[in-house]
Image (tube, coloured by chain):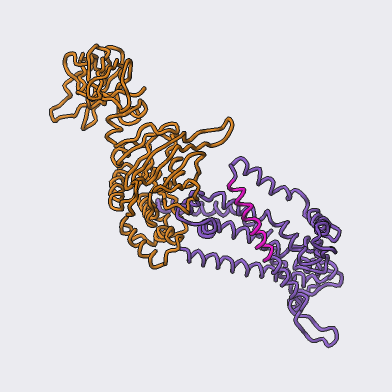
Amino acid sequence: MTTAAEIAARAEREDIRKRWLLSTPALVIIFLAGIGPLLVVVLYSFLTPGPYGDVKWEFSTDAWIGVFLQRDMFDDTLGIADAHLSIFLRSVRLSFATTILTLIFGFPTAYFIATRPERTQALWLFVITIPFWTNLLIRTFAVQEVIRNEGILNNALIWLGITSTPIQILYTDWAIGIGMVYVYLPLMVLPLYASMEKLDFRLVEAGYDLYATRFQVLRRIIIPLVKPGIIAGSILVFIPSLGAYVTPRVLGGGRQMMLGNLIELQFGAGRNWPLGAALALTLTVIVTVALLFYVRYAAQSEQRHG
Amino acid sequence: MPATPDRNAIDVRSVSKIFGSGADRVAALDNVSVVIRENEFFTLLGPSGCGKTTLLRLIAGFDFPTEGQILLHGQDIAPLPPFKRPVNTVFQSYALFPHMTVAQNIGFGLEMLGKPMDEVTARVDQMLKLVKMEALRNRKTSQISGGQQQRVARARALAPQPKVLLLDEPLSALDYKLRKEMQIELKRLQHETGITFIFVTHDQEEALTMSDRIAVMSSGKILQVGSPWDIYDKPSERFVADFIGETNFLTAKVEPAEGGKANAILSSGKVISATVAESLVPSGEATIVVRPEHARVVKGEGHLPGVIDNIVYFGTDTNIHVRLDDGGAFIVRQQNTRSAGCGFELGEHVGILIADAAAQVLKD
């Protein structure tokens, strides 16, 4: 005889089994696309480079040492890998600057769109996403065309008499910065817009009613309320900026490398896959640390307001 | 209180507000003039779309008039932005800041005015006490009930001690019982603070119970301004009479009589005495109004004969619907007594007796 309790227990077990079955596709994708490749990269970073790329299946920590240190060519002593360090620093610096600049340009843009009548909002969003239809490489070459020494920008500056000789922008950090701000701006605008679109503008009116000036309304009411959008936008811009590859390659001319280019170099001409894997993991760690820091900060300021 | 030569808090002078242009042009306010006195509970009453909220927004500074002036204690404030006007608003949606606590919401205005922190705190405490919310000072505004939110909204708007408090249908989101409580609380608050209140509502009952004076609005115009008693008993126009309470409209021949009154000859040939709105000289055909409680149903002929159509019991009162012999309809409200029944039956031939001077001659 089965009691009611047994029937209920069996039904529950069946329910649990069904739930696992239903979530299998998601788990498979998470493993195959996410955790699996990451494990492969971790494995490769502890192997020895093969002569023509690829890896030899011999354990080695050389790759990890090579991330931070380099062996002197003459006396074989280990010193800090200045080249790598400066590339790390440039990557973080440029990504940070890109995030701040896209925020500065993106915030008013998103606010403008969110305050349009509903019909025109869709049109403005459409305009924002148009650049996505063009290949990234082509867009980047277009930026190169604008900022090169005989380009539109320099010609205009000379014509206006602001400068007599072209300003060297291309192949500098400035060029990479300009390119990344241009490329990643929509990634900032869209989440900002999503937040602002939900903003109750009656709160803005209430702010004005209670003697807040425009700036105070922005600082005390709008910014705290659209903070989720600011955080999402910053993350969406900062992370791909750190790993940016095409933009620094085209606009930095190979001399001003970023992490993405350094990693690509190891898998290509450098023929040092383990070092490439170790560098890629270093990038992942930097991103994770930056994210943790950001989330921490966001939670703290949330408490302070609370 | 500074001694002002005129005791006008707000003086709206020939204000028009036009939205859109060309074919979409809408005059939300059409040459409106009204004076709101100091320390007054003034209500803008009208159906939705009549322009009452637009007028309130013009006074608050969220919109600017297309034409005309708005004076606050004699000074033109029409061009000033909202944050430079000593006027605060209680919003229909309350518009409390969701990222701040109750206390932070109430202190916001004072903080923006640059008051020192200890003064802000003291004033916030005082306001919390006034609206009986001391226990909830550190709650987020999303964690309190609708009635409590309404109280916070009120405290927040009163904290900076505005010259005029604007209230945009602040009770419409509350249930009936709470609304009744809040009506009394608001009235008491206005009395205690002595601040001029401008209250916007579409609820005629709310307007009658709370206001010192009421302006009835329709289609961007103010039709009549007066005390609740004036508005109810002496409506000047059909719209006002119809919008406020139940009313019987009758067509009659009117002629002037002594004491500014008029004689109205009804369809039955009977003559009754009627009051007349100021500046109106009654003559010829006119519409007169009689409130249901100002008439009685009698056995016999009365002023107007008819047949009882329907009898509706209300608890305190009973409405008797009479189909008049001239084809019109007439409702009489009579108070119920303990003795059962209203004393009449459906289909009974009766007469309607209108109280002396209870009828009012309308403009149109």
Task: Work out whether residue B43 or residue B348 is closer to the camera in this orientation and state it.
Answer: B43
Instruction: Give coordinates of residue B219: x percent, y percent.
Output: 44, 31
Residue A11 appears in view = no
Instruction: Give coordinates of residue A277: x percent, y percent.
Output: 75, 69
Count of numbered tags: 0
Task: Work out whether residue B209 or residue A118 is closer to the camera in this orientation and state it.
Answer: B209
Q: What residue is shown at x 33% (from left), y 15% (from top)? A: B285
B23 lies left or right of B124:
right
Q: Which residue lies furthest to the bottom in this view?
A: A75
Vertical comparison of A262 with B98: above or below: below
**Majority secondary structure in the magenta region:** helix
Residue B202 appears in view = yes
Which quadrant of the structure image shows residue A274?
bottom right
Task: Tell me the colour chain B is drawn in.
Answer: orange
Q: What stretch is highlighted in magenta?
A: A96-115
Q: In which quarter of the image is the C terminus of chain B?
A: top left
Q: In which quarter of the image is the N terminus of chain B?
A: bottom left
Task: Work out whether residue B180 or residue B207 is closer to the camera in this orientation and state it.
Answer: B207
Instruction: Give coordinates of residue B341: x percent, y percent.
Output: 17, 25
B331 lies left or right of A69:
left
Chain in purple (letter)? A
Q: Residue furthest front?
A: B5
Q: What residue is shown at x 78% (from left), y 69% (from top)? A: A262
Instruction: Give coordinates of residue A29: x percent, y percent.
Output: 66, 56
Q: What residue is shown at x 29% (from left), y 15% (from top)? A: B253
As for residue A111 lying within the magenta part, the answer is yes
Q: What residue is shown at x 20% (from left), y 18% (from top)? A: B345
As for residue A277 lying within the magenta part, the answer is no
